[in-house]
Each structure stands twice: as C-alpha cells, then as structure tokens.
Image (cartoon, rainbow, N blue to C red):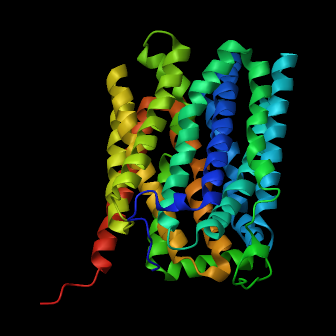
Amino acid sequence: MRVSGASRSFAALRHPGFRVFLACSALAMMADNIEHVISYYVIYQRFHSTALQGFAVISHWLPYLTLSVYSGALADRLDPRRMIQAGMALFMLVSACWGLLFLSGGAQMWQAGVLLVIHGLAGVLWLPASQVLLYDIVGPVELQSAVRLGATARYLGMLGGPGIGGLLLNALGPVHGIFANALIYLPMALWLVSAPYGPRFRQLARPVRAIKGFSEVFATLKVVRENPVLLSMTLLAGGASLFIGNAYQAQMPGFAADLGHGNMDHAYSMLLAADALGALTGGIVLESRGFLSARPATAFRLAMIWCLALGGFALSRSYALALGLLVVAGFVELSFSSMAQALVQMNAPDAIRGRVIGVFAMSSLGMRMWSGVTVGLLGSLIGIHGSLALAAGAFLMVAALLSLWERAREPAPLA
C-alpha cells in the first residue's frame, strides 16, 4: 500500500489546482442537489407516488451499474478533463429540459424517467474521470487528504443544495429556479478548458490498454478480487449502496410529512441539510485534526455506526431527534466512504487506475439502483420508516461480517 500524507492538516490544499478543482466540484454537486430538490418536489406534488420516487433512484443509478467500468477505462485512454466537460454539458441540458417541462405544465411520468436516466449518464461520465484527474492533480502522497476533502466538497454542495434549492424554489419558482441552476455547472466546464492536468501533463506516461468489452470488466474484477483491501472496500461500498444508498433522500418529502413539523417545505430542506451538515463537519474535523487514518477496520466500524444512526432516524417520531441522528449519519458516512475511496485509490495499479475506480464506482454508486427497491419500492408496501430500518439492519450485518473477515485475515501477533 502506498503511504498517504494525510496526517498533515488539509495537506492536499497546498496544490493550487486542487483548490480550484475542489471549489468547482462543490458547485457542481450543489447544482446536482438543487436539481434534485426542485425536481423531486415537483414530482411529489404532481404525482404523489412513492413508487415514482423509488424509480427516480433506480433510473438515476442504473448507468453507474452498467457503465462505470467502461467509463473508467475511457478515463485511462482519453483526457479525463474532456469527459468531465461532457458530463457538465449533459447536466446543464437536463436542468434546461426540466425547466421546459415545468413551464409547459404537462410533465408526464415517462418524461421524468428519461431525464433522470440522462442525469445518471452525465454522472457516470463525471465521477470516474474526476477521480482519475484527482490523482493527476495531487499524486499519491496527499491522496487521502484530497479524497476526503473532495468528499467534503461534495457534501458541502449537498449542504448548500437544499438551502439554495429551497431559496430558488420560493423566490423564482420551479421554472426559473431550475433554469438558473443550469448555470452553476459552468465553472467546472470552463476551468477544465486549459487546466494543466491529464495525459499530456503526466511526467510518466501510463501504459494504455485497449478496451475489450466484457473481458475487460472480468480482468479488472480479478485484480480487485486478488487484492484484499480493494476487495473489502469494494464490498463495503457495494453493501452500503445495495441496502441503503441515498434512496432515503429521495423519500425525504415523505419523512418530512410524517414527522409533521410545521411547514413541510422547510422540514424537507432541513432534513436534507442535517445529513449534509454532519458530513461537512466530519470532513473539516477529520482533516484539521488528522484523525482516522485510512484503515479497513476503521471503515467497517464507522459503517456500522452509520447503520445505527439511520435505523434510529427511520424509527424516530421526534423531529429534533431525527435531525440529530441525520447529523451523526452524515458525519460517519463521510468518514467511511471517503476512507474506502482513498484505500482503493492508494492500492489501484497505475496502469488500470481508471478501470479499478470504475469497478469501485460500479459498486459504490451503481448498486444504489437496488436501494430504490429496498427502501423505495418496499417502502410503498410496508412504509418508508420500516423499509429504511430493515435496510439499515441488513447492512449492519454485512459490515459486521466484513469486519470479522478483516480481523481473521490479519496475521497473528508474534509470541
């Protein structure tokens, strides 16, 4: 395993390019979440369909499940900057199309589904390529710091997204609000026009291998399987996505309505913001203090705490307690997810870095499609509180088993 320099506070920020990349990533993620806030709200108000909210999760994450490895392979071969720009262009297109649908007043369920799928395609172009570019920007020494700060920036976008999304929704309405949101993706696209990173700027050229269809996927999976750290972190991320993912966020309008705390719009935004606030706090505290260096055993323990916090949220009938538990959930989710990502980055072979990141994205993001079933569609049958509690309990058992496996494979101490 490569040694990370994350013990220094905010180590990755010494790279000027990373500072710009971090700010642009936060803006792009904020725009992503503003779109979700506005579109989920309009979908809920128009259709009142728990099943459609679950389908929003499935259709959004399906491209990650099917295309992440190929996207990572393309990032190995092509300029990741151009792939990210293509993703930003699709995001802007989707926001503009939502605006046109809202303007017409005749949005139909199939049209919403198509836009959610295109949004997922934009993400699968963006995220694996951004992780490859991240390694180009900071190198291996500050990688853990960069991954953790990058995850913090994404949660900063999640924190700002609900608040600004709610502001745009109330001040401009859904039509003008979603049109304004399209412009927030521009800084990332414009900075990447001449950012000095990517294949032409690497000191040592990485070997480039052709993409060979399914055989490429199987070959990369074999590399992951033979490396215990890559395998355990990929399984942990996949389990979190399979059982829970972010499906509970798509159901937040329902949780807000059930908790019955004042104005529903305000309650909805506050629940989303509490989760993001916990993650933002976690990123700042962990980076400033150098806590929780990347270790598989630590990642497993944090994941189990996440399950307990979300299970408590699902069963809570107190709005104040629900907010507090979401803050805790956000803190530990940021901690274990960024730790898993950093461990994968540090252990990925240089020649197939994009492909390994693609496998991890397929697991950590693509498997979220099924959380639309475990939390969303199941929630339409037994209620979203029960489905989230069951999902959290199932993943708790998975994380505990992985922790036991990690402990069993550790060498016994010398007598």
Classify the position of the N terminus by image quarter. bottom left
Does residue 377 appear to the left or right of 284 in the view shown?
A: right
Could you say where residue 290 lies in the image, as x and y percent from the top left?
A: 35, 59
Please give the name of the residue rendered at 33% of the width and 62% of the height, measured from the top-left corner: 298
- From where the camera sits, is residue 55 visible? no
Which quadrant of the figure has residue 158? top right
Tell me if I can see residue 98 in this picture.
yes
Residue 288, x across and y down, in percent: 38, 52
On screen, residue 191 versus residue 220, left or right, reads right
Q: Quadrant of residue 399?
A: bottom left
- Tell me what residue is drawn at x 45 percent, y 72 percent: 4
Q: How many marks?
A: 0
- Point out the image quarter for the C terminus: bottom left
Q: Residue furthest left?
A: 415
Considering only vertical position in the picture, is 394 above or below 340? above
Q: Residue at x 60, y 76 (%)?
A: 221
Please name whichever residue, 58 or 362, is drawn nearer the observer in this view of the structure: 362
The image quadrant of residue 377 is top right
Question: Where 56 sits versus 232, above or below?
Answer: above
Left or right placement of residue 259 versus residue 131 in this view = left
**Viewer-side residue, 76 vs 395:** 76
Q: Does residue 11 appear to the left or right of 68 in the view shown? A: left
User: In the image, what residue occupies the spot 37% across and 60% down?
Assistant: 299
Q: In the orientation shown, which residue stands out farthest toward the bottom?
A: 415
Q: Position of residue 256 (x, y in %)?
A: 48, 20
